[in-house]
Image (spheres, grey):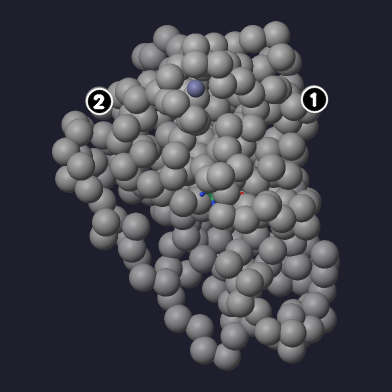
Amino acid sequence: MPSSLRCPVCRQQLISTDSGASCTSGHSFDRARQGYLNLLPSHKKRSANPGDSADMVQARTRFLDTNLYQAPASVLEQAVKNSTAGKTNPVVVDAGCGEGYYTARLANVLPNASIVGFDISKVAVQRCCHRSTNSTKTQWLVASVADIPLLDNSTDLIVSVFSRVDWQEFARLLKPGGQILILGPGPDHLLELRQAIYEDVRSYPEDKLLEKLPESFELTKKDTVSDELYVKGKQTIMDLLAMTPHFWHIKPAQREKLEQLEKLNCQLDMRLYTITYQSSGL
Ligand SMILES: C[S@@+](CC[C@H](N)C(=O)[O-])C[C@H]1O[C@@H](n2cnc3c(N)ncnc32)[C@H](O)[C@@H]1O
Ligand SMILES: [Zn+2]
């Protein structure tokens, strides 16, 4: 376990124990049988089961395991290698890691890194544990991006894939010169899926994420990741829907229409932002 974990109650360092982890004030956290630590105190939860539900997690796993998202995964692998080049034992954190598809791939290409993957959804983190192999040991946590149970100035690289960004927490975690890799939608991401659902479809605004970029961060690089997706079969189309916010907004009639489709040709249009932390100026 990396020594950079901190107690979610008193914020002191957590030390590994036989059964999990504890701090010197006596707060202790048992390791679940699957291998993760739950560092999300119940009083900080807004609902009983925050984050993605079991059905959404299963859909994500089924979809990602088709490897239709091979292009962004490969681009991200290369980017994490570039960002950690020359570092002996970098600490790499996947914030909002979902069911661990990208985290596991990062662990494979960064054998000398200490990898932490966390998500607020317990069922997602339970799935993550299936993605670990002995050669790619990752510390999986149930935790929120709003209060990350890692020490200040402990992290070399934060990866955030279609997940919430908390600039203040990211600044607290990162070492000076540390980086964030953010993968998110470009203007025409999954355009044809949206057209199959809604009457009136517009492109997303480009670079919305950068509007709130604090001064202590600098955009170092921006890459476009694009591909043509040939999504075959009703199940895979509905799984793709479950990975998007449209899953929440879709009306029953729109859903029924989508369920009729046997195949969908669709654009993958993503942006990968490499952002460097300069100093604490938040
Ligand atoms: C769109 S999914 C992306 C998951 C993963 N990065 C991927 O691309 O496969 C967003 C994830 O953020 C998680 N999430 C939502 N709110 C969160 C929070 N406050 N802290 C940590 N994770 C959160 C959800 O449970 C979900 O797994
Ligand atoms: Zn404590």
Neighbor class of circle 1 (other Cα within 10 Å; few <14, some 14-19, many 20+) is few
Residue at figure coordinates x 36%, y 39% from the top left: 169
Horizontally, residue 182 falls left or right of residue 171, namely right
Q: Position of residue 261 (x, y in %)?
A: 79, 78
Label 1 beta carbon within 8 A of ligand 1: no
Q: Amino acid at mark 1?
A: Arg
> Is there any visible trace of residue 110 in the rendered image?
no
- Image coordinates of residue 131 in percent, x first then y, are 73, 31
Question: Ligand 1: does it lie within 8 Å of the C-beta at label 2?
Answer: no
Residue that numbered label 1 is attached to: 33
In the image, is residue 91 above or below residue 162?
A: above
* Amino acid beneath label 2: Pro
Q: Quadrant of the N terminus?
A: top right
Residue in the picture at 43% in, 75% down: 203
**Pointer 1 or 2: first along the chain:** 1
Q: Nearer the viewer, residue 223 or 128?
A: 128
Measure the C-alpha gap from mark 1 to mark 2: 36 Å
Position above or below: 170 against 226:
above
SS label for mark 2: strand
For the C terminus, give its image quadrant.
top left
For the point 44% across and 26% down, which residue is it?
Answer: 10
Q: Is residue 107 left or right of residue 177?
A: right
From where the camera sits, is residue 45 visible? yes
Image disc number at residue 176? 2
Marks 1, 2: nearer the viewer: 1
Q: Which residue sits at x=77%, y=71%? A: 263
Q: Position of residue 211 (x, y in %)?
A: 26, 60
**Residue 179 falls in which quadrant of the image?**
top left
Residue 108 location, x and y as percent?
A: 62, 24
Question: Who is closer to the viewer here, 3 or 191?
Answer: 3
